[in-house]
Amino acid sequence: MAKKVTEPEVTLESKNPNVPRPRLSKLIIKNFRCIGKDPVEIELDDIVVLVGSNNAGKSTILKAYEVIMSHGSNAGKLTIDDFPNGEVIKGYYPEMELHTVVHDNSPGERWIRVDKETKEKYVREQWIWEDVGAPKRRGYDVELEEWSENVPWGAPNVANSYRPQPHLVEAFEDPEKQANEITEILSSVITERVKNISTKKSEGAEGEEETDYERLLSKIQEMQEQILFDSKEEIEDAETHLSSLINDVFPGYEVKFDARPQEDLEKSINLFKAKSQLLMGPTGGYQSSIARQGSGARRTLLWAALRFVNETELKSKRKKSERPHVLLLDEPELCLHPSAIREACKSLYDLPKNRNWQVMVTTHSPAFIDLARDNTTIVRVERSNSGDIKGTTLFRPKRALLDSDDKKRLKLLNMFDPYVAEFFFGGHSIIVEGDTEYTAFRFILESEPDLFKGVHVIRARGKDTIASLVKILNHFDSCYSVLHDSDRPLTNKIKKDGEPKKNKAWTSNEKIIEAIRMHKAPDKVRLLASVPNFEEAYFNEEAKGEKPYNALLTLSEDSVAFERIKQLLKALVDHSASTPDGCIEWETTSELLTELEKLGGDEVIEPV
């Protein structure tokens, strides 16, 4: 019998159980479908949200991620339709690059580079398709400073077995394919859970506890080895007989039968029958496969499957070597009833809590962006006039410098207004403090749509939240505006010592200006304060009761008031426009005090 050759086992997993699993950190794509020679870079996180206009390339990015994560006989294979313009052109081959953060030296020193900014260790891999079919995979050798045909982590099937298993759910895919993907998500989770089922160890047994599945594999391997041992004479007799026959034609030749046990037993064992299906229908009535259900039913079942994963995976005893998963979901808002949107969003954001799932979604809905999460990267995908596609990271919580109070305020704001994140989708952003300003500006926008195209009014619902939103917009390095009430330093309430009580809203002014000063270019921001508040400044009295509704009535009936609010909105959009009466563009609180003194009627105090 031929001697068995033992290959060294090389995996992405560290041999040290205390070392975290490697983390995918960046995906770079060139010359793939609608993405051209200018590379698109996507920073990866537990949750990646791709935003942008239609036909900008978001779905192409999902597909690229699936291609390099996929495994099996069709792993990484492209068709001619995946090449730019459907042609194979030298110098314009599809190319993808993956950066993986590692926490020890298991891949080998020659592959590990240290990021100058984050100090994290990472490994670079590249896939290039010089023709239709499978790619060439290369690793970047940091010692030679060049790409090498050798690769970190060994053969593709070894490396990919420890990378996330992709589950791509496209927006308008074939019902049968969508049904198969939902079934695969559930089957993969259930299969792993079955593998981890354990029975009580026999009394006196030593060593680590074995699962029932591991005992099954051990028994099959033992039977294989026994069968090979028992058939040794028959195999040797066949080898001798064949060698004597072949020797008549090729003297000195012999035949050897390379008989050895199946190494990867798991691939040859199916716990469930092939092409298992999910059936759905009324209890006691006809139940059909989900491929025959409507789009809304299939999407609802997808959310039910993800919720099942959310609620049960954390409870299960998971093995460190278990393969992780990545959900690639195109437009999760499709076919969702409004009441289901919040539940669907929660399911997506909760999925990575068990550290075994990553999520990448494309969306046109601000409701699927949760600003209060720590594990979210938001990327805007844009197509230029020349057709080039660019991916720009808009938001990462750590870079936005949000503190715990910011996150609490944003979480509450997200609950009250799930569309607050509309500014991620482009346009000029205007942050306002309250409902009255928001309602007044929305009335102007609806009345003059051509004059204010692309303007987003963000309702902060409080002065402290303004500072939190400013930090996020600073992170974009974008141009935006803020309108808030100056308020007064003192309230009308009297303390026990007879002195007027200080106004907490006044102290928030300093937080707002401090946040704006954090912008890389503060001149991109216009900060206006209504003195002393929006209602008094523009409607000549402090509205009581239903302030937004009263403002709306005034604007619809009073053309002078309408024009004043319109000019204010223009000044917030065009930073070069003159400051309207009723507000002040300010940089220090002493400027606000000066304006308040002009109004008279209330005592003002210098801030400490």
Image (cartoon, rainbow, N blue to C red):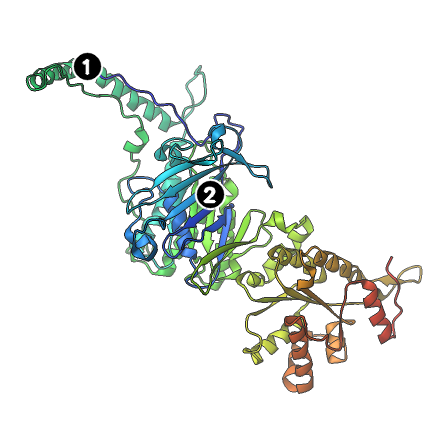
**Relative to 116, 73 lies left or right:** left
Q: Position of residue 354 (x, y in %)?
A: 50, 40
Q: Position of residue 323 (x, y in %)?
A: 42, 36
**Residue 455 placement: quadrant:** bottom right
Q: Eyeballing the image, is 366 above or below 452?
A: above
Residue underneath mark 1: 232
Mark yes or no: residue 207 visible: yes
Q: Eyeballing the image, is 89 above or below 548?
A: above
Q: Residue at x 35, y 23 (%)?
A: 7
Pointer 2 local density, CA inside 10 Å: few below 14, some 14–19, many at least 20 = many
**Relative to 414, 129 lies left or right:** left
Identify the amino acid type marked 1: Lys
Quadrant in which the N terminus is drawn:
top left
Q: Eyeballing the image, is 139 above or below 437?
A: above
- Secondary structure under tag 1 reads helix
Quadrant in which the C terminus is drawn:
bottom right
| 172 or 335, nearer to the observer | 172
Say if mark 1 contacts mark 2, CB within 8 Å. Answer: no
| 252 or 504, nearer to the observer | 252
Q: Residue at x 33, y 26 (%)?
A: 216
Q: Residue at x 54, y 78 (%)?
A: 450
Q: Which mark is residue 357?
A: 2
Identify the amino acid type marked 2: Trp
- Secondary structure under tag 2 reads strand
Q: Position of residue 84 (x, y in %)?
A: 34, 55
Q: Position of residue 234 (x, y in %)?
A: 14, 15
